[in-house]
Image (cartoon, rainbow, N blue to C red):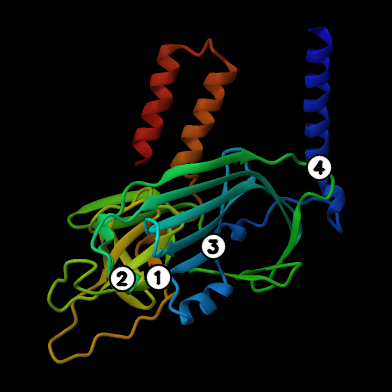
Amino acid sequence: MFRNSFKITALLLFLTHSFLNCGDSLKGKPTPAIPELAGLYVNEKSKEWANKGNIKIQTIWIRRTAKGEMEFFSKMFTRLQFSLSDNREELKIKSGKLQTSDREILFFETITKEFHRNYNGKNTPDPKNWDVRSFGPFIKVKDFGKLLGEGSGKSAEFSSDKNSIVFSNGEVYRRVGNPLFGRIALNVGKLKRTIDNEVAGTVLYSLGPESFPQTEGKQNFLVFFSTTDGLVSGTPVKIGDYPGQVVEVFEHLAVVELNKTKPGLTPPAISPLTPVTLDGIVDSKTISQKESAEELIRRLKQDPNVSKEELIQELEKLKNKE
């Protein structure tokens, strides 16, 4: 029993030491991450897939944690059509931490998850005509951790204009919109909402009447977002340079529409991978609500003697920030 416990402890210490020393793989000394690194990036390969008519996209979403570190989520989304099995969508997510040395970046993958969701609607030859409301929920089919060690990071470089990430294998990811940090104030109908500024997306394809109910004079699109947390129907967005709004929210996806154009005017042409950003006022100096909540949870775990009164005070602070 003692030997097994000792082996487990030694293994955990080794893994912790290995992770903390992964900075040896950096060319320079580890430095705090550049704040502008936070954002949604799209792999340029997605252009090739879009030109071939595939519903497929690969992105990296980077956000700041409550501890001031940077974490990432690499997402590969694909819609698949089969002749002998159920049609479905697949979502593969790899997540982990990253280290920086000025503009040099090392990505350390710690968790890989894969999700499937089946299409239950009318099967048409073109998957772009599938009813977006006829998909089931995403079901996890794979989930495993990855051991970290010397040289396990994937190296990349943040471009000098702070808009692209270039990996050592030549793959390029370009940012959607501006850096994502702070909080953003939005006018949703007659209400004003303030949410974490971590939402950005990109158009997958234009929706026809078979795939989603159409409103006369408006154009709908299916958009893949960094996160759909905080999105509600009526959330104002910019589709490229044009105003629009969220119509319906799904997991990782949402239907957005261009605002109705004036009679006689031709709606602008919106192509796949057109950026979609929230249309509001950003306060980059504020700390995200999620980070505050995570910090409170961390304190509670570390100090079980936190009084009820103190807990109420902290929760009221979070509420007042909304």
**Which residue is label 4 attached to?**
149
Residue annotated with mark 2:
221
Three-letter code, disc 2: Phe
Residue beneath label 3, please? Answer: 59
Mark 3: secondary structure: strand
Q: Are marks 1 and 2 in contact (CB under 8 Å)?
A: yes
Furthest residue in direction top, as rendered: 1
Q: In terms of sequence position, does the residue under pointer 4 or pointer 3 come before the other?
A: 3
* Local SS, label 2: strand
Question: In this view, which residue lies farthest toward the bottom?
Answer: 264
Q: Residues within 10 Å of mark 2 (few under 14, many from 20)?
A: many
* Location of residue 314 (image quadrant): top left
* Vertical relation: 242 (above or below) 231: below
Disc 4 crowd, CA 10 A, few/some/many (<14, 14-19, 20+): some
Amino acid tagged 4: Gly
- Mark pair 1, 3: CA separation: 12 Å
Answer yes or no: do the residues labelled 4 and 1 have beta carbons within 8 Å? no
Residue at left offset 84%, top offset 12%: 3
In the picture of the structure, the residue carrying the numbered disc 1 is 204
Q: Sequence-wise, which precedes: disc 1 or disc 3?
A: 3
> Residue 38 at what x, y percent from top left?
57, 57
Q: CA distance from mark 1 to mark 2?
A: 7 Å
In 3D space, how far apart are the residues under numbered discs 4 and 3 (Cα atoms)?
A: 25 Å
Which comes sooner in the sequence, label 1 or label 2? 1
Judge by depth and name the residue closer to the eye, 81 or 238: 81
